Amino acid sequence: MPQVTATATWPFGQIAVRAAVPLLRQGQAALDAALAGAQAVEDDPAVRSVGYGGIANSIGTVSLDACVMDGRTLNCGGVAAVENVRHVAALARRVMERTPHILLAGEGARLFAVQQGFPLDTLHTPEAVAQWHKERPKPPPRPGPAQDRGHDTVTVLALDQKGSLGGVCTTSGLSYKLPGRVGDSPLIGAGLYVDDAAGAAGATGVGEEIIRIGGSFFVVEQMRAGRSPQEACELAVRKVNSVAVRRGVHPARVAFLALDVKGRLGAACTTGTNFQYAVNRDADVELRKAPEIAVNAR
Ligand code: SD4
């Protein structure tokens, strides 16, 4: 029986791993456990970049993106730019299970949430509103590279007792983004990709740079080609770096996290990203720091 594994992005990923691992140990499927982990972070008002208490866009609206993917079947679902729904990862799963589609956006996604019995909620906390007023950029965003003014997605990857993988990604996205902006996080292949035949990968950071290289799919395809999760993440960061140099916007802030069916982990980030991720170890959860790959690294 494989050793169950749960890993999640950033220090608040510890909340997700703590919620996911007991479920994996009980024999639950990887996707169920990853979703429970992601939801625990969505519910935490102290996490200012996911779910309830997320930082708002440029006009003060909290707009969430999420997706889920099941490595057994490649079934997947996502929701983008959704307002007033706290559990957007669970909503993404409903898209996967109860519609013929993969991605619902904006008002349609919110309507679907209501039809599915999700409560409509305010996602603002007094603390997040105060932070928004204090830090919001003046004047509003202009054309050019996406600005890194604060973000942090939780991506949870899990390996269950049957040796299957599942992944979930959920975020309020880049702070102060333009209304309607959608990042990598709800896009299958960008913010998340999971295939039992190759591995699971998730991304965090400036979504525009992740989408541009098809980030998570790229990582999984490197594993399919025989590379370790660590090698695969490093190659993806090198690719981001080379594109960022070509576009004159380096260093782009991006990180990747990967897990394969043997339970091997990989993680890497661009310089200055200071990416950490949580993983279960014995009875506890450990926080690890990913290597930073410099722009000119060979
Ligand atoms: C986005 N990738 O919306 C997300 C933001 C984020 O770590 O991860 N941050 O672009």
Image: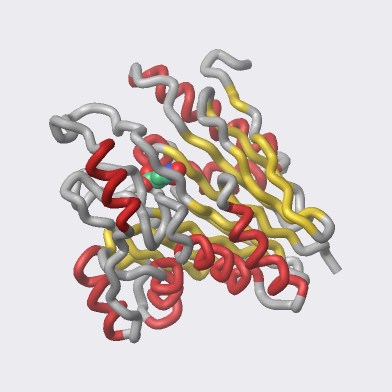
Q: Residue at x 22, y 71 (%)?
A: 108
Quarter where residue 269 is shown: top right
Location of residue 275 in the rendering, given as x and y in whole percent from the top left corner: 57, 36
Specify how the rendered protein is coloured: secondary structure
Location of residue 65 in the rendering, given as x and y in whole percent from the top left corner: 36, 58
Q: Can residue 221 be seen by looking at this rendering?
A: no
Location of residue 126 in the rendering, given as x and y in whole percent from the top left corner: 30, 56
Work out whether 279 lies above or below 252: below
Q: Is residue 190 left or right of residue 32?
A: left
Nearer to me, 41 or 217: 41
Q: Residue at x 39, y 67 (%)?
A: 88
Nearer to me, 98 or 123: 123
Nearer to me, 225 or 260: 260
Location of residue 235 in the rendering, given as x and y in whole percent from the top left corner: 59, 31
Q: Residue at x 77, y 71 (%)?
A: 161
Please state, as top left, top right, bottom left or bottom right, where the N terminus lies in the image.
bottom right
Q: Residue at x 38, y 38 (%)?
A: 150
Q: Is residue 64 left or right of residue 169?
A: left
- Count all numbered tags in the image, as a single digit: 0
Work out whether 93 lies above or below 58: below
Q: Can residue 292 be seen by looking at this rendering?
A: yes
Tell me the quadrant of ligand 1. top left
Quarter where residue 100 is shown: bottom left
Work out whether 163 lies above or below 114: above
Q: Residue furthest left?
A: 139
Work out whether 297 lies above or below 79: above
Quarter where residue 22 is shown: bottom right
Please state, as top left, top right, bottom left or bottom right, where the C terminus lies in the image.
top right
